[in-house]
Image: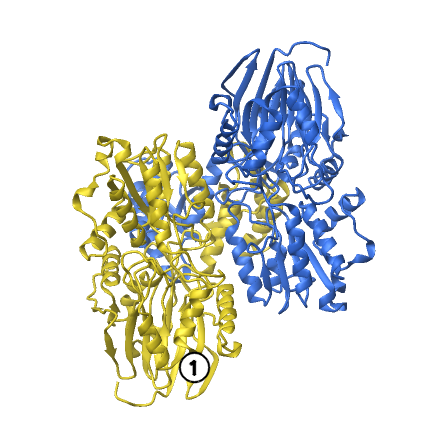
Chain colours: A blue, B yellow
Amino acid sequence: MKKKNTENVRIIALGGVGEIGKNLYVIEIDSDIFVVDAGLMHPENEMLGIDVVIPDISYLIERADRVKAIFLTHGHDENIGGVFYLLNKLSVPVYGTKLTLALLREKLKQYGHNRKTDLREIHSKSVITFESTKVSFFRTIHSIPDSVGVSFKTSLGSIVCTGDFKFDQTPALNQTCDIGEIAKIGNSGVLALLSDSANAERPGYTPSEAAVSGEISDALYNSQNRVIIAVFASNINRIQQVIHAAAQNGRKIAVAGKNLQSVLQLARKLGYIEADDELFISVQDVKKYPKREVAIITAGSQGEPLAALTRMANKAHKQLNIEEGDTVVIASTPIPGQELIYSKTVDLLARAGAQVIFAQKRVHVSGHGSQEELKLMINLLKPKYLIPVNGEYRMQKAHSKIAEETGMKRSDIFLIEKGDVVEFRGQNVKIGDKVPYGNILIDGLGVGDIGNIVLRDRRLLSQDGILIVVITLDKQKKHLVSGPEIITRGFVYVRESEGLIVQATELVRSIVTEATETSNVEWSTLKQAMRDALNQFLYEKTKRKPMIIPIIMEV
Amino acid sequence: MKKKNTENVRIIALGGVGEIGKNLYVIEIDSDIFVVDAGLMHPENEMLGIDVVIPDISYLIERADRVKAIFLTHGHDENIGGVFYLLNKLSVPVYGTKLTLALLREKLKQYGHNRKTDLREIHSKSVITFESTKVSFFRTIHSIPDSVGVSFKTSLGSIVCTGDFKFDQTPALNQTCDIGEIAKIGNSGVLALLSDSANAERPGYTPSEAAVSGEISDALYNSQNRVIIAVFASNINRIQQVIHAAAQNGRKIAVAGKNLQSVLQLARKLGYIEADDELFISVQDVKKYPKREVAIITAGSQGEPLAALTRMANKAHKQLNIEEGDTVVIASTPIPGQELIYSKTVDLLARAGAQVIFAQKRVHVSGHGSQEELKLMINLLKPKYLIPVNGEYRMQKAHSKIAEETGMKRSDIFLIEKGDVVEFRGQNVKIGDKVPYGNILIDGLGVGDIGNIVLRDRRLLSQDGILIVVITLDKQKKHLVSGPEIITRGFVYVRESEGLIVQATELVRSIVTEATETSNVEWSTLKQAMRDALNQFLYEKTKRKPMIIPIIMEV
């Protein structure tokens, strides 16, 4: 970066604000555009039939030539799950740490990404120089190893993105946090700080990872039977802790689930997980060992963390079913909206005779810093402006309140929504512009074709089903040739509602006969008349409003 | 009850075990059948389009002449919400305390129940004599006043149903618990105890109601603005506490919501809520008072506890919208499965500028006893056998574990499922028989006509929508006269998928032409061929599986 003055800086969140998930932050320094993280989010209950949600990136596509690089803070889906879709539209280098890029390669393979990709590995000492800025990194501690923060140097001060972080004094897997480096960036002057708000509503400090190792080890020690431990496949810390605890308690380990096996293999290859080979046995061999000498680790994807456990409890798992006396440790907490699935799975496991350890014991701790840790980050970096990110609105608001407690002025804290542009020009700062933003819903291969209309139809269909009525009319003589034929799905139990269907058919017959006898009726008007009459009749009889589809065939 | 020996006693749960909700317990003493509670349950997320769920009562209907009475323990939906459907089939007297019957009358009016009903009011000293037994009651403490337990005296020992209860030493609304009476029943010998397992997984004691009054009063005291408090309409204790706290803090009260207004009016008329008239103002008059002198109480039904709050936050409430600086107290906890709606509502309120007090402050406590209180009930009644009820399986299991801690043998504790019959004949006890049981799903006016097929269709429709393909064939010449015409809903965004629909139409045309040219094809075989071809084609193109409905019209 030749020593010249930065004219203007723009910061935009296309995802990751007003929500937890699909983080995507745009940092514009003069004409260069940089992207920090490109994640996905799991669909909410109302997004019926949708697989994943990614941010609308049309703003970036329209400026593809100015986009210089994508920087990834760590390997969670919320941060790398959308890179595949970006690389379909932008050919741009992707910078990330060793484990993060390894996880990204796996994902790109999974999605069948066949275009050439420019993945560049960095570490905490790397510095990448661009026309408009110098980019440096600092190690942070999160629930996955190799996580970093990113800092962009400009003459107006640095722009710092923390990524997800906590300050844990006894972290897992000898992770460290470059507090010295962070302080140095702080001393050199920080213009704007984008910091993690996920736990901004929680007072005090987030408990340490060390607390979890003890609980898992106790579970393995106390049980005279098999112990099955469910983790998130992406939570590599937890996997290492389970392996350590099993080894300490003289138990072999069986790894259930392809996804978990590939993550474990990758993490061991890259040195993020230490484990001797003879510690592992296959799931089929579990029955060859005394129950006291076996531990099983299983994981579902973030979307269905407990899918495998549910199958085991229902005796529907190919290799391993729950037996009376088993202990099951659920070492993960439900993501919002999944609480019911969790409590149902716990119930199923109890029915199958297992003793279940979950929330009541500290077998999981959050990877995000609580209020005191967020204050520490602010005090280290001493930013002129703070932009709370990675949280719902109320978490951003809570983050703003504790920032004020450290002495920041409310006017120097921006609670932004998706698409808001925070612009720094010289000493002035302005929020005003709005760029295109939104959710892109992915269903199967379809990227973004599912909009509100399709979702609305699915909701309607899911409430009271559908009633299809078909008639065939003679085009010239305009009279009924065949039908009306009525077919329903999801509306009534047909065998018990014959009377209702017969009455509805007669109703339609009378409407069609009357319409075709009198005037030169338009098909669309006739269809509307059929729809209105059926709507009223069916609501009176059943208090239900099925979707009604009149179809007119001409011969 | 003339002094004669009871030959046999049968206990069956038609609802309320393996679930929280729709309590319905059948107590058979020789030829007499008694019903304790007849509640409803709110549908789970997968029960698409369903309003409420009640137990299958065909077992009772087939023995209508032997059913002598329905006893209600308290006025919550889970205990009285199904009485309307029972009274449609059985003409039988219903016994309940003053408030419970008053709430039942409101519900019967709401459902438009026009048949004559025989409601008989009881109090804790009442004793009802039948051929086979004497029924007595004891006051309990729960989150609604006037709750009682029910005891059936037989020569084999009493059968005791506690209903929902906790032991609270500083309860709200001068409620009391007849511990003396319970001990007396215990001393006279209890054969079987059906006790509340909802909090059986929680160690220690459930916090007292008194803790809540303090928090609500603080919220009203600390705020210099308006305070809006959301409660469950059925939680009459909480309503009284809010009224007391407002009066203490010199605030007028506006009651938002018809349902809450009618419950308040009823409870005041019956003397369960004390409040001076001039304390109340209309919601419209709220703006006439300084913000510091106003409190608003609002409530949704159990199904949508926060519906009104969401409208206020979205500025879509007819009378009252959230303003910057308002404090909102959510004095209720989400029922399982509603956690996401809660956190979204909190977020909406934060966006609208309100400060939200909910889980982190003790503004709500459970109305169910924790482990120490459940042990106390067992020690008071010293039952020969224990049947944990009102809980999911894992809660019944936890209840069984703590019963063992009090010295009961595991073999004397029955973890029953719906329909299991626990039979006592002389000194022997047996579990074996199974009576008809299940869920009756109520959708609009339809009672029980919605079965698994309709639900399965709704689920399918909700995932990838529907594709309808209609063709008209000449019956004699067996050739295509019109169509194929394809209509889709909830599958693809039609405007962007014309190509796909055209290809699908051509695919169907080729199948029909080929089939009608060659052989004397059966319509059902032709439909299946169309369905299979479309399934494969559409999955290849979109990775989606819409419901496919082929329709053949004949002319």
Q: Is residue B189 visible?
A: yes
The residue indicated by pointer 1 is: B423
Residue A224, given in percent of the width and then of the height, sits at 68, 68
Q: Is residue A62 left or right of residue B549?
A: right
Q: Residue at x 26, y 43 (%)?
A: B248
| Residue B544 in which image quadrant | top right
Using the image as rendered, state which of residue A331 and residue A514 is in the foreground: A331
Kindly identify the amino acid type of the residue bearing the numbered disc 1: Glu
Above or below, B19 against B357 in this view is below
Q: Is residue B521 left or right of residue B137?
A: right
Above or below, B58 against B301 in this view is below
Residue A32, given in percent of the width and then of the height, sits at 66, 17
| Residue A2 in which image quadrant | top right
Q: Chain of mark 1?
A: B
Residue B397, given in percent of the width and then of the height, sits at 51, 68
Using the image as rendered, state which of residue B411 and residue A303 is in the foreground: B411
Using the image as rendered, state which of residue B157 and residue B537 is in the foreground: B157
Q: Residue at x 44, y 67 (%)?
A: B17
Above or below, A430 against A236 in this view is above
Q: Is residue A181 left or right of residue A303?
A: right
The N terminus of chain B sits in image quarter = bottom left
SS at circle 1: strand
Q: Is residue B122 left or right of residue A476?
A: left
Q: Residue at x 65, y 21 (%)?
A: A187
